[in-house]
Amino acid sequence: MFFDIFTIIGLIIFAQVLLNTQEDFVEAFDLESIQMTDFTIRVQNLPHHVHYKRRDAILEAMLTQHFQQVIKEELEHMRMEARWMNEEDDDFMDLAKIDAKNDPNKLNPLPYDIADVNFGKADMTTNFLLLKMGQLQN
């Protein structure tokens, strides 16, 4: 009888230890792994498709150009702030030199990269309704 009770108590303790170590492992794994959400920003309130004549490539190009300008301005701001605080600013790119060296006939690497601009829907209700309609037809 006592053996059964100790077995059940041991099993409960083992399950709790297993749950706690799994949560710690998942947290450590999440901190050490690189995921798309680490490099993704979400932009809301984009202009209507009619404004860009339903051509997503135009909007994608304009967003990419905007993001590149924002990053360039932020790098310049960080460089000026580092100089103001009398820190060494060797870590930051001199953007004037970068712009002067850019040859329009060559592709030059940038100190940053906009990998891709994708469009998606935040509200998936329409998709679920379309799936249900498809299932009704089958």
Image (cartoon, rainbow, N blue to C red):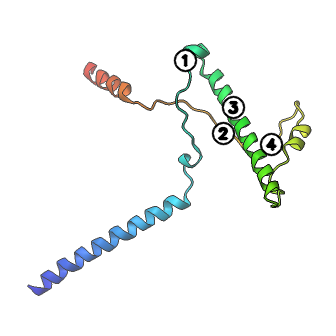
Q: How many labels does the image show?
A: 4
For the residues labelled 4 and 2, the Cα–Cα distance comes to 13 Å
**Disc with the residue nearer the chain's start (3 vs 1):** 1
**Disc with the residue nearer the chain's start (2 vs 3):** 3
Say whether residue 49 is visible: yes
Where residue 104 sits: x, y (%)? 87, 30
Callout 1 secondary element: helix
> Which residue is at the front of the view, 8 or 91?
91
Which of discs 2 and 3 lies nearer the camera? The answer is: 3
Residue that carries the numbered disc 1 in the rendered image: 49
Relative horizontal placement of residue 128, taking residue 63 as reference (left or right): left
**Disc with the residue nearer the chain's start (3 vs 4):** 3
Residue that carries the numbered disc 2 in the rendered image: 115
Residue that carries the numbered disc 3 in the rendered image: 66
Q: Residue at x 80, y 55 (%)?
A: 84
Q: How crowded is mark 3: few (under 14 residues within 10 Å), some or many (20 or more)?
A: few
Label 1 close to label 2 by CB (< 8 Å): no
Relative horizontal placement of residue 108, taking residue 129 as reference (left or right): right
Which of discs 1 and 2 lies nearer the camera? The answer is: 1
Residue that carries the numbered disc 4 in the rendered image: 109
Residue type marked 2: Ala
For the residues labelled 4 and 1, the Cα–Cα distance comes to 32 Å
Relative horizontal placement of residue 64, taking residue 19 as reference (left or right): right
For the residues labelled 3 and 4, the Cα–Cα distance comes to 18 Å
**Disc with the residue nearer the chain's start (4 vs 2):** 4
Residue type marked 1: His
The N terminus - image quarter: bottom left
Residue type marked 4: Pro
Q: Residue at x 78, y 43 (%)?
A: 110
Q: In which quarter of the image is residue 106?
A: top right
